[in-house]
Amino acid sequence: MAPVEISEAAGKQMSARQQRLDEIRELAKTMTYKEVMAHTGLSQSALVRAASRGNFKFKRDPNYGMSNYGKKLSDPVEDREKAERIIAYRNVGMTRADVVRALEISYKQLGRLIWEFDIDFPTTAEKRLLQRHRKVAITETV
């Protein structure tokens, strides 16, 4: 089988594509996707394809995943009110699950409030463990 000859127009197109790929590869060494997009006007999907075909990676964005880092997203006044209600519910004898349902908050938020306001609110498992230790201590003294 004879090698396939490439037309002159196709050859120019391939060399232009290779030239563009080399240019993007050089930019990727020092720039992020966002910066190269602004510099070249290419879309991110085009840059991803170029990186895949050219076997290179772009510089990682140092701010990636930091949009909410260090920001306090909750209201301190609301948190204080919820903490007071959590303490009241605990004193009545409600479990953590009951408090979550009553306040209509997530278990994660309950944990954050307990940690933030240093509330002593043991889980049911921790309560059982304390009761066992008390029973053992009582039987040893008797």
Image (tube, grey):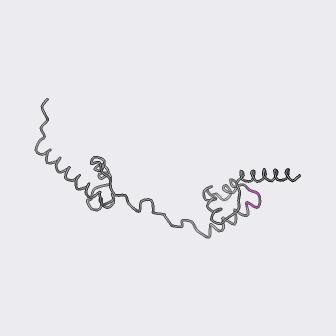
**Is residue 40 left or right of 101 when viewed as pictured?**
left
Tell me how many marks there are.
Answer: 0
Vertical relation: 22 (above or below) 10 = below
Residue 124 on image: x %, y %: 72, 52
Residue 75 on image: x %, y %: 58, 68
Farthest-out residue, top: 1
**Is residue 121 left or right of 45 when viewed as pictured?**
right
Identify the residue shown where x is 49% and y is 64%: 69
Farthest-out residue, left: 8
Q: Quadrant of the N terminus?
A: top left
Q: Which residues are magenta?
A: 89-94
Residue 121 on image: x %, y %: 70, 59
Instruction: Considering the whole magenta stretch, tell me its main secondary structure.
Output: helix
Residue 95 on image: x %, y %: 72, 54
Q: Quadrant of residue 79?
A: bottom right
**Is residue 100 left or right of 44 when viewed as pictured?**
right
Farthest-out residue, bottom: 77
Q: Quadrant of residue 90?
A: bottom right
119 drawn magenta: no
Identify the residue shown where x is 74% and y is 51%: 129
**Is residue 97 left or right of 28 when viewed as pictured?**
right
Farthest-out residue, right: 142
